[in-house]
Amino acid sequence: MSDELLTVKEFAKRLKVGRSTVFEWQRAGVFLPGRHFIKMKRVLRFIWSDEIVVALSDATTKPPQPATRRRTPSTAKAAGVNWDY
């Protein structure tokens, strides 16, 4: 498999997932900058290779981690953020 640079839309289409799923994976740290994707200002490109497929298979076979931080309504009001939105 040769390395290709793909847009988020092309990458999501190839994996048969939505664009938001790709962004969630990126924020969760599934992909490593410079190795799995390149970001220059607002331009994001994914490097399609064997390594990215392995990273995805490893990330999707791990059990989901429970949320560790939850704000209570009293602290949410004090912070000025509506966490129930």
Image (cartoon, rainbow, N blue to C red):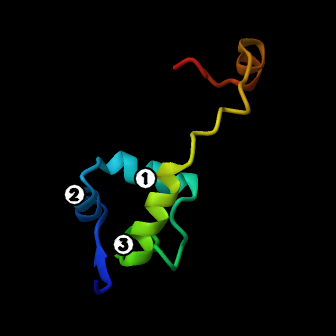
At mark 2, the secondary structure is helix
**Labels 2 & 1 near each other (Cβ < 8 A):** no
* Residue at the disc numbered 1: 23
**Labels 1 & 3 near each other (Cβ < 8 A):** no
Q: From this view, report whether residue 57 is shown above or below residue 78.
A: below
Looking at marks 2 and 1 on the same chain, the residue that comes earlier in the sequence is marked by: 2
Amino acid type of the residue tagged 3 in the rendering: Arg
Q: How far across and how far down the image is residue 51, in percent?
A: 44, 75
Closer to us: mark 3 or mark 2? 2
Amino acid type of the residue tagged 2 in the rendering: Lys
Residue 42 in view, yes or no:
no
Q: How far across and how far down the image is residue 69, in percent?
A: 73, 31
* Residue at the disc numbered 3: 45
Q: From this view, report whether residue 12 is shown above or below residue 7.
A: above
Residue reaching furthest bottom? 2
Residue reaching furthest top? 74
Whole-number angstrom distance, CA of label 2 to CA of label 1: 13 Å
Quadrant position of residue 48: bottom left
* Residue at the disc numbered 2: 13
Q: Residue at left 36%, top 72%?
A: 45
User: Quick check: 50 left or right of 82?
Assistant: left
How many C-alpha atoms fall within 10 Å of the one at disc 2: few (<14), some, or many (≥20)? few
Q: How far across and how far down the image is residue 20, in percent?
A: 36, 46
Quadrant in which the N terminus is drawn: bottom left
At mark 1, the secondary structure is helix
Amino acid type of the residue tagged 1 in the rendering: Phe
Looking at marks 3 and 2 on the same chain, the residue that comes earlier in the sequence is marked by: 2
User: Quick check: 42 left or right of 13?
Assistant: right
Quadrant position of residue 32: bottom right
Q: From this view, report whether residue 35 is shown above or below residue 43.
A: below
